[in-house]
Image (cartoon, rainbow, N blue to C red):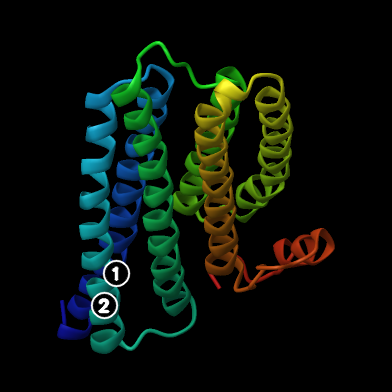
């Protein structure tokens, strides 16, 4: 094996390691979100603290992955598909870190409930639970789409964001009615609004990850794209090997 082949294989391994690390970070954020939601639904102070502690690990992973990305660009000077992959990873890292921040907000709401009165229950809990499940599915689906560089799967995730947005607005209307009917519930209801908004934002971040997957796989920037523009991007002949 000559030195050129060795360097090429080493470079390919570095790119594969980068993909693996972003998926590992994604799994950490998924775990944090699941813990935060469970903490809010019970409510459970220990689970809330665990979700908040996990955010520090997510932040550390963001810093380390940013370092790896910069190092790869400087040393390897990537072009074409490889450059798209590295740029896409950098963008996805940011989305995952922000998702972790939203999960932390949910965990802090759980702490509020646990600290004040275990008999105080969050209003519209079932609706919030269903919205959280939908956002969690979006996040997992976006990460799976990245793992396989599957633009079609990523497009399906983008479409699902409308449902999460609609669920948020429905929850908001319900909570406003709830507060009007019983002013004593204003404080926990406002807390529930905060949680519902955090879940809606998690859906947005999952959608953004899916858009970055399409950029990596097809070389098309579909941020702010219409459904028609998205369809044209997916029909691109370049694909993940271009």
**Foreground: 203 or 16?**
203
Horizontally, residue 214 falls left or right of residue 105, namely: right
Mark 2 touches mark 1? (CB < 8 Å): yes
Residue 2 appears at what percent x and percent y?
A: 16, 82
Reading the image, the residue beneath label 2 is: 8
Which structural element holds mark 2?
helix
The total number of labels drawn is 2
Residue 72 appears at what percent x and percent y?
A: 27, 79
Can residue 30 be spotted in the picture? Answer: yes
**What is the spatial separation of the Cα atoms under label 2 and label 1, in whole angstroms?**
6 Å
Can residue 240 be spotted in the picture? Answer: no
Reading the image, the residue beneath label 1 is: 12
Horizontally, residue 70 falls left or right of residue 136, namely: left
Task: Locate residue 220: give its quadrant.
Answer: bottom right
Outermost top residue = 119
Task: Locate residue 106: give its quadrant.
Answer: top left
Residue 207 is labelled as none
For the C terminus, the image quarter is bottom right
Assess disc 1: are there few (<14), some (14-19) or many (≥20) residues with their C-alpha within 10 Å of its C-alpha: few
Indicate whether 80 appears above or below 231.
below
Residue 114 appears at what percent x and percent y?
A: 32, 22
């Amino acid at each position: 094996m000559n030195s050129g082949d060795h360097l090429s294989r080493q470079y390919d391994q570095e790119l594969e390691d980068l993909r693996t690390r972003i998926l590992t970070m994604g799994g950490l954020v998924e775990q944090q979100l699941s813990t935060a939601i469970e903490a809010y639904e019970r409510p459970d102070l220990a689970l809330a603290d665990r979700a908040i502690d996990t955010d520090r690990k997510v932040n550390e992973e963001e810093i380390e992955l940013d370092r790896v990305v910069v190092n790869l660009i400087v040393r390897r000077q990537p072009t074409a598909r490889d450059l798209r992959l590295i740029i896409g990873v950098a963008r996805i890292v940011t989305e995952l870190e922000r998702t972790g921040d939203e999960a932390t907000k949910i965990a802090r709401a759980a702490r509020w409930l646990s600290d004040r009165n275990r008999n105080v229950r969050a209003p519209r809990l079932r609706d919030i639970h269903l919205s959280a499940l939908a956002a969690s599915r979006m996040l997992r689906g976006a990460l799976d789409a990245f793992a396989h560089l599957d633009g079609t799967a990523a497009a399906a995730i983008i479409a699902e964001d409308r449902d999460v947005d609609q669920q948020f607005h429905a929850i908001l209307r319900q909570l406003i009615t709830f507060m009007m009917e019983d002013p004593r519930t204003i404080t926990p209801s406002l807390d529930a609004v905060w949680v519902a908004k955090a879940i809606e934002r998690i859906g947005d971040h999952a959608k953004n990850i899916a858009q970055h997957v399409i950029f990596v796989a097809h070389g098309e920037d579909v941020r702010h794209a219409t459904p028609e523009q998205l369809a044209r991007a997916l029909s691109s002949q370049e694909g993940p090997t271009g």
